[in-house]
Amino acid sequence: MKRGNNKQKKRNNRQNVVSLSKASSESLHRDAIMPFSIMREISYVDSTTARNNPGGSYLITGIRINDPYDPDPAILSGSISGFKELMQFYNNYRVVSNTVDVTIANQESFPIIWGLVFSQTNILGSIATAAQALNVLENGYTTGARTISSKGGLDRDTQVCKIPLKDLVGNAQLYSGDVNYTGTVSSSPATSLWCFLVVVSGTGAVLANGYVFNSKYTYNTKFFNRVLLNA
């Protein structure tokens, strides 16, 4: 009889543990206004749609692809639409991947060469010649160099690239664990990752008319470290 009682007690204990586990799990998560982390896609569209360089034969512009707080430091963009609203609930963010969609139309009477390059190094201000600008397109994470005909011909081109940022860093654990790749509601990540648009004259002439383009950067972002909700 004692053995039978012991077995019954064990069954009852297991059932109680399961019931308590379910109750605890439900009570912890049922009434959460926002989850403890969330993935969202937010997009930045470059507001500068025409660029030229009357004094030179090349032009390089850059966007920070891991920084929805301030994507374009040249204009102090002031964060992407929806970013601040989401950050009311979270202390930190980390961009997981970025999809870059760029269409460019040549405004010159001669061909131009262009491409996108992704880098951990900020090359803005460090390129001194058209040859150096083309050399940048020899790096691993680039679309390579492409030629667009003069205005009136096949004068436009489109590139769409999705970049997992852990691959750009080269170490998934480092990227997911290093706080230098995270930002806050009022700060950029300490370490920036970049997308550069490189345009070079096909003849060596200056880019007096330049090009017209539209660009969209979609930040697949993890928001985490939820704030304490307190009225």
Image (cartoon, helix red, strand yellow):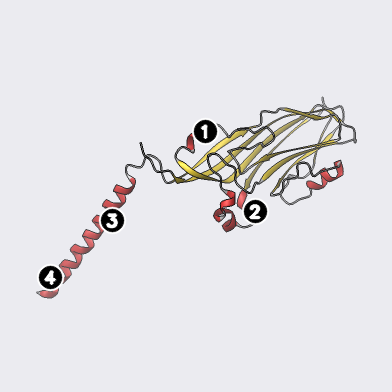
Residue at position x 26%, y 51% in the image = 23
Q: Which mark, residue 82?
A: 1
- Residue type at mark 3 is Ser
Closer to us: 111 or 127: 127
Taking the image as shown, residue 32 lies to the left or right of residue 11, namely: right
Q: Where is residue 126 in the image (x, y as percent from the top left)?
A: 79, 44
Work out how far the residue at label 3 is from the one at label 1, CA to CA, in angstroms. Answer: 37 Å
* Chain-order first, disc 3 or disc 1: 3
Closer to us: 108 or 185: 185
Q: Position of residue 51 (x, y in %)?
A: 76, 29
In the image, residue 222 above or below residue 106: below
Taking the image as shown, residue 156 lies to the left or right of residue 30, namely: right
Q: Where is residue 202 in the image (x, y as percent from the top left)?
A: 87, 36
The local secondary structure at tag 1 comes to loop
* Chain-order first, disc 2 or disc 4: 4
The local secondary structure at tag 3 comes to helix
Work out how far the residue at label 1 is from the one at label 4, CA to CA, in angstroms. Answer: 61 Å
Residue matched to label 4? 5
- Which of the 4 image quarters holds residue 78? top right
- Which of the 4 image quarters holds residue 220? top right
* Chain-order first, disc 1 or disc 4: 4
Residue at position x 41%, y 44% in the image = 35
- Residue type at mark 4 is Asn
* Chain-order first, disc 2 or disc 1: 1
* Chain-order first, disc 4 or disc 3: 4
Residue matched to label 3? 21
Residue matched to label 2? 169
- Residue type at mark 2 is Val
* Residue furthest top in the image: 152
Few, some or many residues within 10 Å of mark 2 (<14, 14–19, 20+): some
